[in-house]
Image: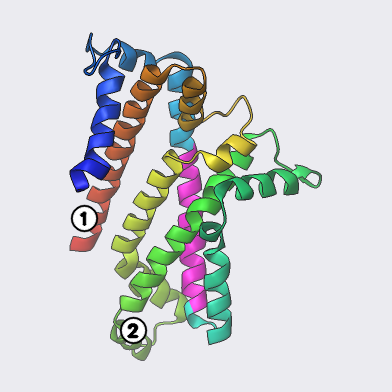
Amino acid sequence: MVLVVFVAPLATVVLAGLAGSWTRALPSGLGFGRVAQAVSGENLASLSVSLQTAVVAGGLALVLGTWAAIAAREAPRWLHRLTDAVFHLPIAVPSVAIGLGLLIAFNAQPLLLGGTRWIVILAHAVLVLAFAFSAVSAALDRLDPAYRQAAESLGAGSLRVLTRVTLPLLLPALGAAAGLAVALSMGELGATVMVYPATWKTLPVSIFALTDRGQALQAAACTTVLLLVTLVALLGLGRIRGRAALR
């Protein structure tokens, strides 16, 4: 079942990206010509934009999500529930609605972000913030309070407990949250289509444009590159997470 639902479609995309043409049951003219086009020119620029957006938006989401999760844990129960609901709101609404809302809200002074890269980064950060918040909140729930109590009994203040006890124990969860944020940002399309300027076009937007023009095989090649780059980024973050878990 997993092969049919997940592996087979991805394998088809990769195969289409390597195909010179596909007019029969099987593709023909397999090679790396389309992949070479996918990592050159405008497509390469779009890939660079996607990576930059994912890193900055993922970093913002990780910092804000971690801060909110830690602060909510110390807040009254009603405020904790309210914070949880607010931070999970982007999951409950279509990403297009998030994009349109940001476009309207930040398209005039005093904070004019429309037409700049920052509105794209903000949209991605908003969309992945919920997942970062959830990952850190779940990790906080699993932390043994004895570590914190021991540190406090030895005279450590709140800031020292946070930096020397809580955050180090959260490193594996932070690594997982960062990986999820980057992966989601790399593939985001719905909100990006609503807000992106011509000078800051992500690779998913370029793939959508290729498909819209009927260039499905070239779109598949770009998608293959996107998959590989995302996988490499996740493997790198996974190694960092693994080292953190061993400490």
Farthest residue to the bottom: give it: 153
Q: Residue at x 42, y 50 (%)?
A: 181
When the figure is inspected, residue 98 is found, relative to residue 150, above or below; the finding is above
Residue 76 visible in the picture:
no
Disc 1 and disc 2 in contact, CB within 8 angstroms: no
Give the image location of residue 203, x and y in percent: 46, 29
Q: How was the colour assigned to the protein in this rendering?
A: rainbow
Query: Which disc number belongs to residue 243?
Result: 1
Picture layout, residue 237 above or below residue 25: below
Q: Is residue 161 above or below residue 153?
A: above
The local secondary structure at tag 2 comes to helix
Q: Which comes sooner in the sequence, label 1 or label 2?
A: 2
Q: Residue furthest right?
A: 109
The residue depicted at 36 percent of the width and 71 percent of the height is: 138
What residue sits right under mark 2 in the picture? 151
Task: Tell me which amino acid carries mark 1.
Answer: Arg
Residue 218 image point, x, y percent = 38, 17
In this rendered view, identify the residue nearer to me: 217 or 51: 217
Q: Is residue 153 visible?
A: yes
Q: Which residues are magenta?
A: 53-72
Horizontal side, residue 64 vs residue 229: left or right:
right
Q: Which mark is residue 54?
A: none
Q: Quadrant of residue 142?
A: bottom left
